[in-house]
Structures are given as C-alpha cells and as structure tokens.
C-alpha cells in the first residue's frame, strides 16, 4: 500500500505510475477527495469533543438546576452529533482504504515502459542452447512415454489442468524441491515450513486481497484461504511487529504447494503441465532496511541464477516492463529457461523488490539502533525455483535419443544414486 502522504504531496507521480501500467489514473482524484473529507470530519469531531469536555466540566460547577439541565440536554444532542460524524468518518475511512488498497506499487525509474511481457528487456543469456541430433520431444509426449506423467488420471481425480506424477517423475520433483531448499539454506536463508492456508488479513497484507480475490481458493465456512505462493505466509510471519534493526536482514526460504484459480486462455499453454491450479514452489524472502533493498535484490537474483546454473540449464534474465510488473512490485527480474521440446522460454522465477508496499499493509516496522521512532522495512521475494516448469526444463534438456532422460548430477544423491530415467 502506498503512503497517503505520497498522494497528498505528489499525486502526479501516482497518476504517471498508473498510466505507465496502462491503468486509469482517475482514482487518485477520488482518493484525494476522500482524504480531504476525512480530515474535515476528524476536525469536526475533535472540535465537538473538545467542546463537550469543556462544558462537562462547567456542568459540574453549575448551581442553577435549570441551567445545568439545559447544558446536559445540549451535550446529549452534541453526543448524538458526534456519533453521527463518527459513523460518517468510519465509512469515509473504509472507502478511502478500499480505494488506496487497489493502487499498485510505483515502478522503479529503471523499469521499462511496456504493454505486456513482450516488452520485457533481456539483460543477459547464460549457457548455449543444446544442439540435438534428433527432434527433441515436448514433455507432454516424453512424460507419458517414460511412465512418469499421467494426464488422464489427473483429469479423473480433479478435472482439467491436473496431472499425476508417478515413480521417477514424482521422485524427481521431490528431489528438486529438497535440493533447492538445501541450496538456499547454504546461501544463508532460514527454512520455514508455513501453513498452506492463511487468514484473509494475511492475504491483504501481502497485497493479494482484495485485488486477486477471484484467483484464490477459500474455505466455505471459515476465513481460511489456500496460499497462492509461500510469499504470502512469509509476509505474514512478522505482521504487526516492530523488529530490532540488528536483526535485519531476515532471509527465509520455504516450500509450499500453491493454489490459483487461473483463468487460462483457450489456445495458450493448453498442453502439458506448464500452467495449472496447483503447483509446487520454493520461495526466497527477505526483510531488510530500506537503503539495503537494492543490494538484497541483486543478491536474491544471484542466488536464483545459481540454482538454475547448478542444474545445468540454459537461461536468460529479463527486466520486467510496466505492462508485466506485478501489483505489489517496485522492480522485478524474471529468469526464463529454454525448453527445447516446447520450443520456448519458460519463466521459472520472478525476483521482486516490493519496497515498503507489503510492510505498510502488514504493519511490519523496525526500530533503529538509536531508538528514534520506527520505520517500515522493505520486503523482497523470489522463486527459487517454481514447479512444474523447472521439471519441464530438466526433462526436455536432459532427454536422450533413446527416449531416456539423464538426471542432473546435483540431483542424483536424492534419486537414490540413479543417473537416468528410462522408458517404462
């Protein structure tokens, strides 16, 4: 959430940011009008309360019974006016918060202006694309032939966009998750195993509600929501807390299953396991001081790149344009891996500097060493990495002419020493 002070002091900055994101800037005017109305109502109610306090003291000193009774009646009427204005104030504050909560973060000046992901800027490419001496198969053919991906039974169990991993496929996915978490621990992150369900206020603090309400799964009877990413519970870990400066930075990693009611376009990503309503992801998350967030952003990108590099996958790094930038993000880098069977680059990680956007919504502050007041922390998040696209990249890049798939060396100890997956 943006600071209300920003709307008052530099509304054009917010308007310009919305225009860069191809959004309507007119809500800024409504926000300013509600903020002015709120301040006038606060002034009115404070003046009335001050008057009531003064008169209440006078009443206690009055000796004339009729005069005192008249003042009491007048204060009763004033109390009713105060209640009315209080009700109006609460409604205005609710309307104001609802509008402000729908305004996305301000893009960093380095973020290129664009319409969508086609305007993302490639920063670098690492590793050469493999030159196969045969036609590489896409994972939707490779998986069933190996007996490790079962689409039909996934559909039988849960409908379209679900699948079942079997045998070496299930073990390979588990190995990837275990290996990535262990790598992040070595990189300096503290592992967390959070709930896969959270309360609505946690989603609000992370910037998921109310904006993405229709993309989330919710319990019918309780205020419990399935997490769309581990970023959500990791944001909520310190909700409402004031951290000591010497604790920062806090770096966490967590595995969760993720659940999203994605509306998928017909004809796009309709084959295979690239997009689904349930997927696994290992997350990296950082709380830090504001002045350190650019360096932490660079560090997290480096850590995610190391993950891809150790898997031996060709990849590229892109800077997201304003047309692709996430709602809460100030600046985001994407990492894409090449999938030779699909014949496309697949995004497997987004590393975002969110600034104080989530901390302001979640009320996460830190107390400087000098003890003078508190400040909002900055938060950053990044996939390290996301499934099932990492699994896709491994299968398609490591496939062999005989239909087998080599297992990346770093994963072999977690695969019981096996070095290859052969057709069933």
Image (spheres, rainbow, N blue to C red):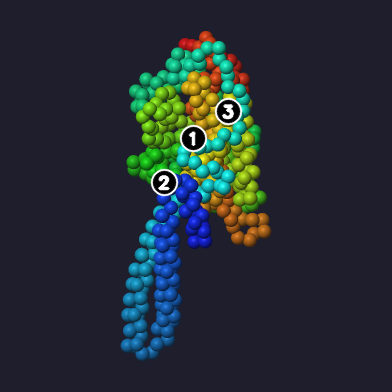
Q: How crowded is mark 1: few (under 14 residues within 10 Å), some or many (20 or more)?
A: few
Q: Name the residue under label 1.
A: 118
**Marker disc for residue 315:** 3
Asked if the residues shown at circle 2 and circle 3 are in contact, with their CB atoms under 8 angstroms apart, the answer is no
Q: How far apart are marks 3 and 1 (CA)?
A: 17 Å
Q: Earlier in the sequence, mark 2 or mark 1?
A: 1
Q: Mark 2 points at which residue?
A: 211
Element on which disc 3 rests:
strand
Instruction: Give above or below for 82 relative to 96.
Output: below
Residue at 41% over, 23% down = 271
Instruction: Give above or below for 244 relative to 305.
Output: below
Mark 2 vs mark 1, foreground winner is 1
| Residue 110 picture location, percent across and down | 58, 45
Q: How crowded is mark 3: few (under 14 residues within 10 Å), some or many (20 or more)?
A: many
Element on which disc 1 rests:
helix
Element on which disc 2 rests:
loop
Residue lying furthest bottom in this view?
64
Asked if the residues shown at circle 3 and circle 1 are in contact, with their CB atoms under 8 angstroms apart, the answer is no
| Residue 243 picture location, percent across and down | 59, 52
Q: Which of marks 2 and 3 is nearer the N terminus?
A: 2
> Along the horizontal axis of the image, is 197 left or right of 397?
left
**Marker disc for residue 21:** none
> Along the horizontal axis of the image, is 69 left or right of 256?
left
Residue 391 in view of the camera: no
Residue at 56% over, 47% down = 108
Q: Distance between the residues labelled 2 and 3?
A: 31 Å
Q: How crowded is mark 2: few (under 14 residues within 10 Å), some or many (20 or more)?
A: some
Mark 2 vs mark 3, foreground winner is 3
| Residue 385 picture location, percent across and down | 54, 31
Q: How far apart are marks 2 and 1 (CA)?
A: 24 Å
Nearest the eye: 313 or 116: 116
């Amino acid at each position: 959430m943006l600071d209300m002070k920003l709307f008052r002091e530099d509304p054009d900055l917010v308007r310009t940011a919305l225009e860069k994101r191809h959004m309507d800037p007119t809500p800024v005017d409504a926000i300013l009008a509600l903020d002015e109305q709120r301040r006038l109502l606060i002034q009115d109610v404070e003046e009335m309360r001050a008057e009531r306090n003064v008169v209440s003291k006078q009443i206690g000193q009055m000796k004339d019974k009729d005069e005192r009774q008249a003042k009491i009646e007048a204060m009763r009427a004033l109390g009713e006016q105060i209640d009315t204005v209080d009700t109006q104030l609460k409604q205005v504050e609710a309307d104001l918060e609802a509008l402000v909560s729908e305004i996305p973060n301000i893009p960093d000046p380095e973020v290129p202006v664009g319409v969508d992901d086609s305007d993302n800027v490639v920063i670098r490419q690492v590793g050469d694309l493999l030159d196969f001496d045969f036609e590489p198969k896409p994972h939707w053919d490779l998986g069933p032939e190996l007996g490790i991906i079962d689409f039909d039974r996934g559909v039988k169990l849960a409908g379209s966009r679900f699948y079942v991993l079997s045998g070496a496929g299930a073990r390979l996915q588990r190995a990837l998750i275990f290996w990535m978490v262990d790598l992040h621990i070595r990189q300096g992150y503290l592992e967390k195993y959070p709930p896969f369900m959270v309360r609505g206020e946690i989603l609000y603090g992370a910037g998921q509600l109310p904006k993405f309400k229709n993309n989330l799964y919710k319990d019918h009877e309780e205020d419990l929501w399935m997490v769309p990413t581990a970023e959500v519970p990791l944001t909520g870990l310190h909700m409402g807390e004031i951290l000591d400066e010497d604790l920062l930075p806090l770096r966490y990693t967590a595995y969760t299953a993720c659940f999203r009611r994605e509306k998928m376009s017909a004809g796009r990503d309709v084959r295979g396991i690239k997009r689904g309503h349930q997927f696994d992801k290992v997350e990296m998350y950082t709380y830090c001081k504001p002045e350190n967030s650019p360096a932490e952003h660079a560090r997290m990108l480096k850590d995610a790149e190391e993950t891809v590099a150790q898997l031996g996958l060709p990849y590229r790094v892109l800077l997201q344009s304003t047309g692709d930038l996430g709602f809460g993000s100030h600046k985001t880098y994407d990492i894409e891996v090449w999938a030779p069977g699909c014949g496309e680059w697949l995004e497997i990680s987004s590393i975002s500097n969110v600034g104080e956007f989530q901390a302001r919504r979640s009320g996460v502050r830190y107390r400087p060493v000098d003890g003078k007041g508190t400040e909002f922390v900055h938060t950053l998040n990044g996939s390290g990495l996301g499934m099932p696209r990492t699994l896709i990249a491994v299968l398609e890049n490591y496939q062999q002419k005989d239909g087998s798939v080599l297992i990346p060396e770093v994963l072999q100890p977690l695969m019981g020493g096996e070095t290859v997956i052969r057709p069933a």
